[in-house]
Image: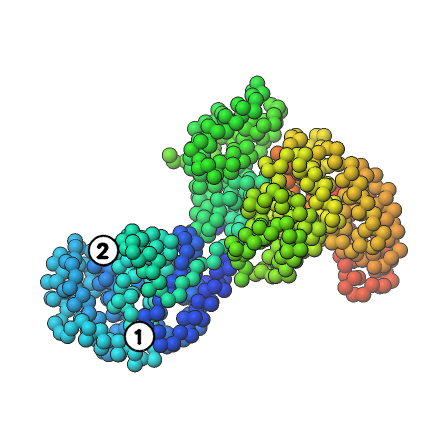
Amino acid sequence: MEPGDKRHYFNDSPIETADDDSYGVAGFADSITKSIVRMQRPVGATIALNGPWGSGKSSAVNLIRSALRKAGDDKLVVTDFKCWWYRGEEALALAFLQSLHGTLKTTLGDKVKDLIPNITQRLLQAGPVIGAAVSLASGAPLTALFTGGSKFASTFFPQGETLEKTFRKLAKVLEEEDRRFLVIIDDIDRLSPDEAIAIFRLVKSVGRLPNVMYLLVFDRDLAERVVAQRFPSEGPHFLEKIVQAAFEIPAPLQVDLNEAVLGSIQEICGNPEEKQIVRIMNLFYDVVAPYITTPRHVARYQNAISVTWPAIEGEVSIADFIALEALRLYEPRLFKAIRTRKAEVCGTKEGGGGKQDLEGQLKSLVEDIPKDRRDLANTALQRLFPRLESMGYGSDWVAEWDSERRVCVDAHFDTYFRLTLSEESLSTKEIGRLVESADNAELVKNTLRQAGKTSRRGGKSMVPVYLDELTTHAARVEKTKVEPFLKALFEIHDEIDLEQDASRGFGEIGNTRFRYHWLIRRLTRRRFSLEERNALYLAALEPAALGWLVDFVSPARDDYKENRQEGPTREEDCLVQKAALAPLTTRALDAIRVAATDGSLLRHKDLIYILYRWRDFLNGDSAEVLAWTNARMSEDTSLVILARELTGRSWSMGMGGFGSLGDRVSKSNVTAQISDDSDIIDAKVFRSALEHLVAEAKPNKEDLEIVQTLLDAWDRKRAGKDDLSDR
């Protein structure tokens, strides 16, 4: 990000309108709103919104308020009771009644004059003495309550009728009204156990009035534990007697959480160089994403990096920064262990310590981490510090790491710790069903086909949602079910690799292919040996779709290339054994040739990508590819298709399998994907054929525009006005 650019700083305030909804809560809020608006003649009816800390309960309430305003029901009066402003059961009782009195008096005037104050007086005279002075943050008339509650009440409230008679009088007034009142009580979780129970009892007792409704917002699990402690015999029945309808806040989708965090990283840290993206995404998926499970986690992470990044911008690697910030926030013991053991994690290994030494070192770093998160912690350590990997790196690697300002370099390590002080929901049941039925090929394929037909906001399908959730739960797929599961996935890949799900910019890097590679990694790594994976993949690739077969074979071959830019690949990290490359390559070439003969290759959405891989699988010999493309030069329809596919498209490229950086990301968008020296198409003949089409105006208007667009882009490229290069 250039100096002077405006940065956006985030806060964790609840959202106010549906336009700000990133997690699909607006539809849920609209449904609750409709229920409230349509509720006629309620008598203390109580609706509960339940959800754990950070799940977005207050945001859901704000969306309900917004939807109620839009509904325009002038017979519905909405008010809020800020329960957490008050401390002590008596203060809460007084404040609750005073708030109710203020709302009713404003609307009904003299009809309810003195009724609630009289009720309050009787309750105070019957209850315990009010404790020490309690300041009411609302600034309402009851600004302080002093000791000697009964004396205070008898002075403040007039003497009069009995409690029961006054309550019946108030109920009669409300019953005769054609207006309804909704009292929203949020933040009950902030109260002490006794205060929370006091709220529930108030709503059930004096709050049970005609034409009055309540929307209570709290963590049900927490509330039930409190009730169980205070009233062991009641159990869940205590809340059931108070709440008529309870709804769980919809859990956000992991893909939405991921995209929100990636978007904020881009906005705060700026756009990285293309060569950095692979490592950024590896660290994001391996270290950051596993800790982001609620909207509050997203907000907390956004807040943190918006403050810490400006202090070290330009001095550190973005990839290492985002990973270490996640550890600082969500795995502080590991973060502290790293910070205090610089000498053990930086640089390269000396003396080539054995496997036991490495395991002992990792164990000492993660020993304070809960057991269920130690694998995650080990992965984070190995991603950040190459010396903790089982493979060896020579000292010449340090120069490259130094140029990237990585945390594993002694000279940069301290910089990272400079600020350190000590509609769319995919239910747990649904993902569980899919995991359990992973060996049911038809169910898997039909589920993903349906996901491809289901649109989400923004136009994307549900496919990314399913794939991200399957990646999260991959370890739950039984080992015996992995092979049939992979077969189904590989067979259906090209059907669900949809254009609308493709990447658009750094904030949403990743498409279906990218997600497939992450999913198969999670399904197999550390669960199967290389020999077992080899057999799994060879069997699973038998029915594989052309696009996925080509895309699988390409990184499998890359794993064994010499002088890989991404660094050496350990054999156990490869997709398949080296001996499998020849039969896999032959299988891919046979599939390409069949598609080239029957015409399906020309119609394949990844045509250009496959043409380049065709050349690569023949070890750089372009003769077959050129023969096929040359045969298309006399076919007008083929020329238009080639022109379209070589213009303004983004193509994924294999970046390796399971090596140190052996993953894949989308290439940046390009304007023209052909050069005069292209080795997969005779550029001179192709251009001449396109110009002839334009001159003869043979195609229809739409096709003519496609051809002209490529010719114009090609001209700009020739003139040096387009820095985009051919492959």
Taking depth in this image into account, of 542 and 290 the one nearest to the observer is 542
Taking depth in this image into account, of 428 and 129 the one nearest to the observer is 428
**Mark 2 and 1 residues: CB-CB less than 8 Å, in contact?**
no
Q: Residues within 10 Å of mark 1 (few under 14, many from 20)?
A: many
* 347 to 72, vertically: above or below: above
Q: How many marks?
A: 2
Residue at image x 52%, y 55%? 429
* 599 to 518, vertically: above or below: below
Which residue has dot 1 on it?
Answer: 210
User: What is the image's colouring?
Assistant: rainbow
Residue at image x 61%, y 34%? 660
Residue at image x 58%, y 46%? 477
* 497 to 288, vertically: above or below: below
- Which quadrant: the C terminus? top right
Which residue has dot 2 on it?
Answer: 88
* 311 to 365, vertically: above or below: below
Q: Residues within 10 Å of mark 2 (few under 14, many from 20)?
A: some
- Which quadrant: the N terminus? top right
Q: Amino acid at mark 1?
A: Pro
Residue 156 at x, y percent in the picture:
14, 67
Residue at image x 53%, y 49%? 258
Residue 66 at x, y percent in the picture:
43, 66
Occupied quadrant, residue 643: bottom right
Residue 413 at x, y percent in the picture:
49, 30
Occupied quadrant, residue 202: bottom left
Q: Indicate the secondary structure of the residue bearing disc 2.
A: loop
Q: Amino acid at mark 2?
A: Gly
Q: Indicate the secondary structure of the residue bearing disc 1.
A: loop
Going by the image, does 412 lie left or right of 511? Answer: left
Going by the image, does 543 lie left or right of 101? Answer: right
